[in-house]
Image (cartoon, rainbow, N blue to C red):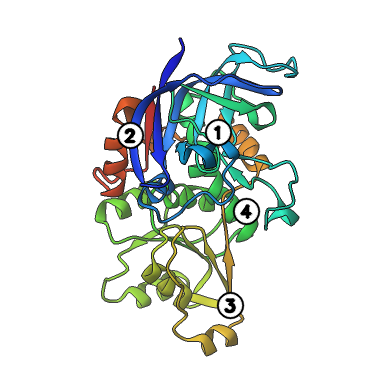
Amino acid sequence: MKTMLAGRLRLDTHTFAVEEVPVPTPGPGEVLVEVRAAGVCLSDVHLIDGSISPAFPVDSVAKARAVTLGHEVAGVIHAVGPEVAGEWAPGTRVVLQAGQACGGCGGCLRRSSCRQPLTRGVDYDGGWAQYAVAREDTLIAIPDGLPFDEAAIIPDAVSTPYAAIVETGAVRPAQAVGIWGAGGLGAHGIRLARMVGAAPVIAVDPLPTARERALAFGADLALDPAADGFAEALAEATAGRGIEVAFDFAGVPPARAQAAAALGAGGILVLAGLTPESIVVSDSTGFSFRGNQIRGHYGSGFEHVEQLIGLTSAGRIDLAPSITAHIPLAEAADAVTRLEKKIGDPIRFVLTP
């Protein structure tokens, strides 16, 4: 097989199409993975509409002005390149980390805490394809009992809220946690906040179906942000102390403003949803008086994916309800449209080559 299907984004025109492209050849320290499942994320939508763009594109992407999307990928090793460790052999089931270290070029502004400055499907070709090349240090073996679709979404849809909760937000048992946005990230944030002992876990979403899902996923309360009595309901649920750690998983300015206003003394707002829009703190004096903080959050570390594979395999998290639908790779453009327009109120669409 010399060619394959791949979902390619033209970075200069912001046009997306599934095209026939050559099957890549793994180089030294790389493997060729036969993709079995690839998640569709809202950041893929933002790449297509131009809201976000590659920060550090590799030479092949920069020269071609095109990239294969897809940073949530699971599959089977098809072939190995030279100098690959013996543990990685054809037939091994793997999930791919969403990014890789850049090798220390010195050009990355995040090099002081360089966990994954180059992102798969953004800075270099990803997994919306029949085959994908991956560096061996970005592979994690997955057990036979973990389905490919559930494994694929761990490196972002699950690991991003996980890292936001356990590290950036540093949530402790019995803390009142607010989750703004119960979509692809927030739905998992609700389950993970409950898993680490947060109480109460309060979900905020304007969609009735999303609020119903939030309750099914473990929220103690699900509120409409536009409802009369919102502030009173939140105060009652937290016994007047306000939210101790609030998470914006929606990336919507009004949600961020409302979350900031809902913080209690010493409360923290974690910005995990991506948006180019400004954040507004309406009462900056009160914000300072209460000792509140705003913390930015992006992605996750390699260790978080490993931990979540272990937690999922141990039965601590059931990701089957997170898979909204399986969509053929050839229909990737339709999956993007359905996610952008929230058709079917999706958590995660998964492409199947």
Looking at the image, residue 149 lies above or below residue 335? above
Question: Which quadrant of the figure contains the C terminus?
Answer: top left
Q: Secondary structure at mark 2?
A: strand
Residue 17's tag is 2
Q: Residue 71, can we see it?
A: no
Q: Which residue is mark 3?
A: 292
Q: Secondary structure at mark 1?
A: helix
Ranked by sequence position, the earlier of labels 1 and 4 is 4
CA gap between label 3 and label 2 equals: 45 Å
Local SS, label 4: helix
Q: Is residue 23 positioned above or below 13 on the image?
A: above
Q: Which residue is mark 1?
A: 312
Q: Earlier in the sequence, mark 4 or mark 3?
A: 4
User: How far apart are the two marked residues, 1 and 4, measured between alpha carbons?
Assistant: 16 Å
Give x and y (percent) for residue 24: 53, 21
On screen, residue 73 versus residue 353, left or right, reads right
- C-alpha separation, residue under disc 2 versus residue under disc 4: 37 Å
Instruction: Give the quarter of the image for residue 344.
Output: top left
Q: Which residue is mark 4?
A: 166
Mark 1 is on which residue type? Thr
Q: Where does residue 71 sit, x and y in percent of width and height? A: 50, 38
Query: Of 324 and 95, which appears nearest the observer?
Result: 95
Report the Cα–Cα distance between label 3 and label 1.
34 Å
Image location of residue 312, percent across then percent down: 55, 33
